[in-house]
Amino acid sequence: MLSGLIHSHSGIRWILLAALIAAVVTSFGGWKKNQEYGKNSKILHLSVLIITHLQMLLGLVLFFMAWGVKVDFSQMGNSMVRFFTVEHSFTMLAAVVLITLGYSRSKKISESALRFRKIFIFYFIALLLILLGIPWPFRSHLGAGWF
């Protein structure tokens, strides 16, 4: 079961990244071109929010199944333990908070350009945090793969 959850969490990462990049690009374009905030934009931004929360739930389940009960803070010298218990967890939690705040605060704005700008700023910072917090395969000490 743990292996299936790990693969689900890792696989949904790609869906989230694709949706988040699309949201950042379209919101930047909508902001700079002063486009109307329409139904498609709302669906994309809401989809990013939903996928992000789904990913967070899977991550929390994994954390408590794999690490949460067994965390020994005296092992913080071990880079893998430190990464998954502290760095990855808090970086991703901050990204989820930013995406949630960006979406909820943008709903209160009626002017399209400002709404796109708000979403762009929050989602872009969240994207950077997510890219920093992913256990990429080139970070060999973490033992993670592409999927």
Image (cartoon, grey):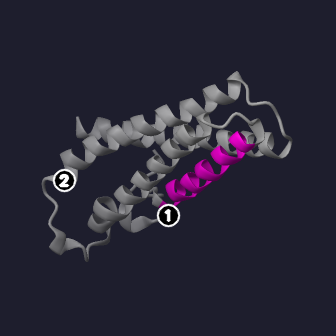
Spot the residue most to the bottom. Answer: 77
**Which kind of residue does numbered mark 2 sit on?**
Gly
Q: Position of residue 84 (x, y in %)?
A: 32, 59
- Sort mark 1 into few (<14), some (14-19) or many (20+) by Cα contacts within 10 Å: few
Spot the residue most to the top. Answer: 39
Q: Residue at x 65, y 47 (%)?
A: 118
Q: Which mark is residue 138?
A: 1
Q: Earlier in the sequence, mark 1 or mark 2?
A: 2
Q: Which mark is residue 50?
A: none
- Report the side of 115 relative to 144 (left or right): right
Task: Specify the principal SS of the magenta part.
Answer: helix
Q: Residue at x 67, y 45 (%)?
A: 24
Q: Which residues are magenta?
A: 114-132
Q: Residue at x 45, y 65 (%)?
A: 139
Q: Residue at x 42, y 66 (%)?
A: 140
Q: Position of residue 35 (x, y in %)?
A: 82, 34
Pick the quarter of the image with the N terminus.
top left
- Report the side of 75 relative to 120 (left or right): left
Q: Is residue 127 magenta?
A: yes
Give the number of marks: 2
Q: Position of residue 78 (x, y in %)?
A: 26, 73
Q: Position of residue 111 (x, y in %)?
A: 74, 36
The residue that label 2 is drawn on is 68
